[in-house]
Image (cartoon, coloured by chain):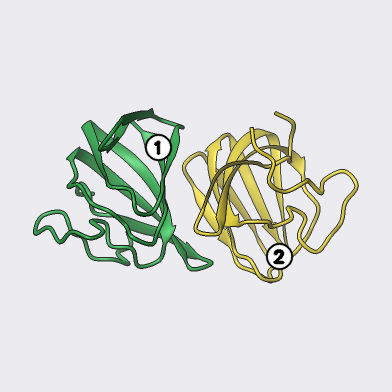
Chain colours: A yellow, B green
Amino acid sequence: MEHWRPKTVAALNGQEIKLIKVKGEFPWHVHAAEDEFFLVWKGLFRVEFRDRIVELSAGECITVPRGIEHRTCADAEAEIFCFEPAGVVNTGNVVDAVFTAPTGTTI
Amino acid sequence: MEHWRPKTVAALNGQEIKLIKVKGEFPWHVHAAEDEFFLVWKGLFRVEFRDRIVELSAGECITVPRGIEHRTCADAEAEIFCFEPAGVVNTGNVVDAVFTAPTGTTI
């Protein structure tokens, strides 16, 4: 599975659950109307905010509230579950030629 | 953590993410208006429907659609993540003196 390309593994109640393989730094962005939840399945994952950095290991989770600028990072490959409303664009308010992924992609 | 007592670890977009330690058999029940998603974190977990049984191990997940009667089981202790709308009663349409848990409980 390529990095930073979310794969939807379930859809329910207007929400989607995605599995994402990550490595490197994702662009800074904001989701104006959606909170995002990340659960680390394998490896080490980092969520950076403008004023702090949160380091997460397997089994740890974080909610990124709507409207808060953030970027996600992993120095080595990691595997992440993401839970958020259906149709969210991964780069939020940003369009990035490399990182903006199609929505609704499944494995 | 006691068995079958969901602990809400995050709330977002009107949904809740719960961690549940399970062992034994949960009562048969239905959620009339809510789909439920289960992700197995540790151990072996089983979702029984009236016409089939789904066995899940760590890293495997299942969506139980609204309106479908089911029960959850684990022969040995297991740890499960559950994603569902906020306020769902764990026993759905059933009130069980032992298994019906308060909602909104956190760790």
Mark 1 is surrounded, within 10 Å at the Cα level, by few (under 14), some (14 to 19) or many (20 or more) other residues, namely: many
How far across and down, in percent of the image, does residue B24 sit?
Answer: 17, 37
Query: What amino acid does circle 1 point to?
Result: Trp
- At label 2, the amino acid type is His
Under circle 1, the secondary element is strand
In percent of width and height, residue B9 lies at 41, 58
Chain under numbered label 2: A
Residue at 19 percent of width and 45 percent of height: B26
Q: CA distance from mark 2 to mark 1?
A: 28 Å
Q: Using the rendered view, name the quadrant where residue B99 is placed.
A: bottom left
Compared with A17, B12 (above or below) is: below
Q: Position of residue A51 (x, y in %)?
A: 69, 66
Left or right, A11 with reference to A21: left
Residue that extends furthest to the front in the rendered view of this protein? B51
Left or right placement of residue B58 versus residue B12 in this view: left
Q: Is residue A97 visible from the viewing direction of this image? A: yes
Residue B93 vs residue A69: left or right? left
Residue A6 in the figure: left or right of residue B85: right
Question: In the rendered image, which residue does mark 2 sit on?
Answer: A31
Give the residue displayed 65% in from the left and 37% down from the top.
A106
Nearer to me, A87 or A68:
A87
Q: Position of residue A86 (x, y in %)?
A: 62, 56
Find residue B55 and name its label. Answer: none
Label of residue B41 in the image: 1
- For the C terminus of chain A, the image quarter is top right
Is residue A15 placed above or below A79 in the rendered structure?
below
In this rendering, does residue A37 appear at all? Answer: no
Query: Is the N terminus of chain A in the top left, top right, bottom left or bottom right quadrant?
Result: top right
Task: State whether residue A36 is above or below residue A18.
Answer: below
Residue situated in front as seen by the camera: A19 or A22: A19
